[in-house]
Amino acid sequence: MSPRCCAVWRRRARRRLNRFERSLNARDIASWLSIMTLSYHPAPGALLVCDYDTGFREPEMVKRRLCVVITPRLRRRDGLCTVVPLSTTAPDEPQDYHCEMTFARPLPKPWPGDRKWAKCDMLATVGYGRLSPIGIGRDAQGKRRYIYPHANGDQLKEIRKAVLCALSLRELTIHL
């Protein structure tokens, strides 16, 4: 094959690949990467993994992170829920919009430890395709296993107070 033919073939292959990549959606990609995305609205207080990799830019959140669901299922808002990301690192200077959470049992890697910090100033409304349960490996038959931890009622209340502080609505915290 001549060098010119190879170049033409590479250009065509590159165009086809670009067309194919544009046609993909988050659910297809997640299924190929063996990530179990949600197909239902999680309960408020559910701890999940949120994939902030696509569609966000620095200094926004740009990695996979634990999050807490803070909204119930709302009418005419199918496929979306509002979450607050969690951090394993304590803030340098804790603010009213940070909320410390302690869990009875430590979470698995890569989120070790039993203490997390809710970053309530980084509130986001995301599609179910970005959310997945926390994976803990495989069982003896090779089937994936997941855990479904929840924030308790008091923790969820504190997170909602911190969200109101982040939105400059501190005076509304008396209603929680």
Image (spheres, rainbow, N blue to C red):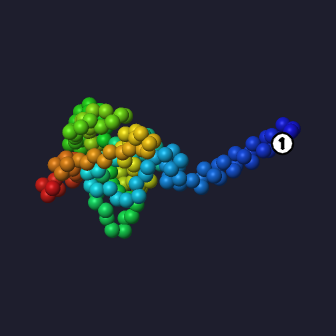
Tell me if 95 is positioned left or right of 82 in this view: left
The residue that appears at 70% across and 45% down in the rendered structure is 14
Residue 128 versus residue 60 in the image, above or below: below
What residue did someone put label 1 on?
5
| Residue 58 visible here | yes
Look at 36% across and 34% down and name the residue there: 109
Task: Evaluate whether residue 130 shows in this view.
Answer: no
Image quadrant in which you'd find residue 175: bottom left
Quarter in which the N terminus is drawn: top right
Res. 144 image quadrant: top left
Where residue 20 appears, x then y in whole percent? 63, 52
Q: Is residue 34 above or below residue 71?
A: above
> Is the residue marked by circle 1 packed among few (<14), some (14-19), or many (20+) residues within 10 Å?
few
Residue most toward the bottom?
76
Q: As displayed, is residue 113 above or below residue 71?
A: above
Quick one: 112 or 136, which is closer to the camera? 136
Residue 114: image x %, image y %?
24, 35
Q: In the displayed structure, does residue 157 sit left or right of residue 27?
A: left
Question: Label 1 sits on what residue type?
Answer: Cys
Depth order, front residue of 137/103: 137
Q: Is residue 81 left or right of residue 98?
A: right
Q: Quadrant of the C terminus?
A: bottom left
Question: Residue at the location (41% across, 58% down)?
Answer: 39
